[in-house]
Amino acid sequence: MNRMWAVDVEGNGANPPEIIELGIVEMDGLRLTGNVKHWQFRPGREITPAVSRIHGITNDDVAGAPPIEDVVDDIFLWLEDSPIVGHNVRVELEALSRVLPDWKPVAAYDSLKVARALLPNEEKFGLEHLGDVLGLKDAASQAVGGGAAHSGPYDAAMSAILLEQLLSPLPQAERDRILMDADILNSRQGSLL
């Protein structure tokens, strides 16, 4: 299975958070295909000012957006049972599972775990920091037609590009081992990339 989706969600700051933005970018193996999906949603509870300062999305920005419940069939159609990738992917998995209770990807690869394994001397592992250190910011922005850190499509692209940057130079057997270790669903399948 070569197709995967790099995924990023942004929330409203509630507990548990409601998804207000979802960005997914398609990968074929370790490469982006150029297929990008982006949605914004109107949450049931307002976006807190603290999280608006982080991701830049305000209540006015999503006032005309549909509630996520109106779009779940479309999201499910895109994600199906494909593997997903994300930086601290547990956040995406938990948030999406709340609105897609019948959805379960075959694998959930955490680019944060991959970075920690392959960059042992790095002091910080935040996606924005790693993008700076590895010079990936322009590539992520170009992949989704613009954007910056903490936007769903940009962060999804950054997770995918980070994964490619870290794994591409490695032999296939090493890639597979690292990916299996980074799969938070503990799928143990054959070669995926």
Image (cartoon, rainbow, N blue to C red):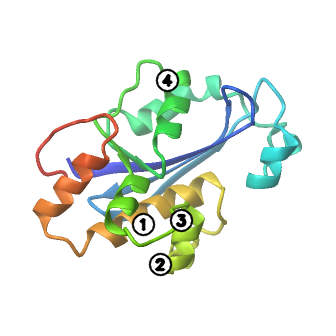
Looking at the image, is mark 4 or mark 2 earlier in the sequence?
Answer: 4
Foreground disc of the pair 1, 3: 3
- Gap in angstroms between the C-alphas marked 1 and 3: 14 Å
The kind of residue tagged 1 is Leu
Mark 1 — residue? 162
- Gap in angstroms between the C-alphas marked 1 and 2: 8 Å
Report x, y in % for residue 157: 49, 61
Question: What residue lies at 49% left-to-right and 26% top-to-bottom?
Answer: 97
**Dot 1 and dot 2 residues touching (CB under 8 Å):** yes
Q: Can residue 119 be seen?
A: yes
- Gap in angstroms between the C-alphas marked 4 and 2: 34 Å
Helix, strand or loop under label 2: helix
Q: Which mark is residue 134?
A: 2
Q: Nearer the viewer, residue 44 or 124?
A: 124
Foreground disc of the pair 4, 2: 2
Foreground disc of the pair 3, 2: 3
